[in-house]
Amino acid sequence: MKYIALIYSNEKTDPKPGSDEFIKMIGEYRSATDKFIEDGVLVAGDPLESVNTSTTLRGRGGNLETTDGPFAETKEQLGGYYIFECDNLDDALKYAAMIPSVKHGSIEVRPIMTIVE
């Protein structure tokens, strides 16, 4: 079964690019990603650009509205994801716990729905 691990953190308090903490975190991400590949569970994974680059679409009353920025103001923003192929939720949680941002943010793990036609 496929599981998505959504990575949330606070962009304002995350390690800043170029800082020692950021360089360390990137190394931890590389190590985690290597482990996911080695164990054969990685399907996909990517970081996202800053929430400031997002555009939100809403359909209201037959009209399509666009808004710069995220859907909601929150303390934590979606910053990236991994998709794992695992036998069960416990295995997916084990791998999600290896994602470095779990130390200062949160990781939401959800099964990906399989639609059979």
Image (spheres, rainbow, N blue to C red):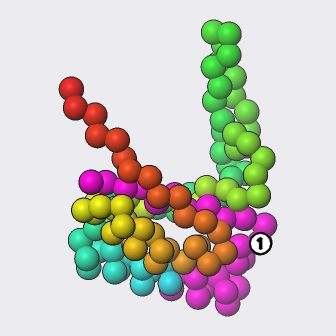
How packed is label 1: few (under 14 Cα within 10 Å), some, or many (20 or more)?
Answer: few
Q: Nearer the viewer, residue 21 or 85?
A: 85
Q: Where 55 falls versus 74 (above or below)?
A: above
Tell me where residue 29 appears, x and y as whole percent: 49, 78
Q: Where 9 falls versus 39 (above or below)?
A: above
> Quick check: is 43 in the magenta stretch?
no
Q: Nearer the viewer, residue 35 or 106?
A: 106
Report helix, strand or loop for mark 1: loop
Look at label 1 and name its amino acid. Thr
Q: Nearer the viewer, residue 23 or 104?
A: 104
Residue 45 appears in the figure: no
> Quick check: is 19 in the magenta stretch?
yes
Q: Residue at x 38, y 50 (%)?
A: 111
Tell me where residue 87 appears, x and y as whole percent: 24, 62
Q: Where 115 falls versus 108 (above or below)?
A: above
The region drawn magenta spans: 1-27
Name the residue beneath numbered marker 1. 13
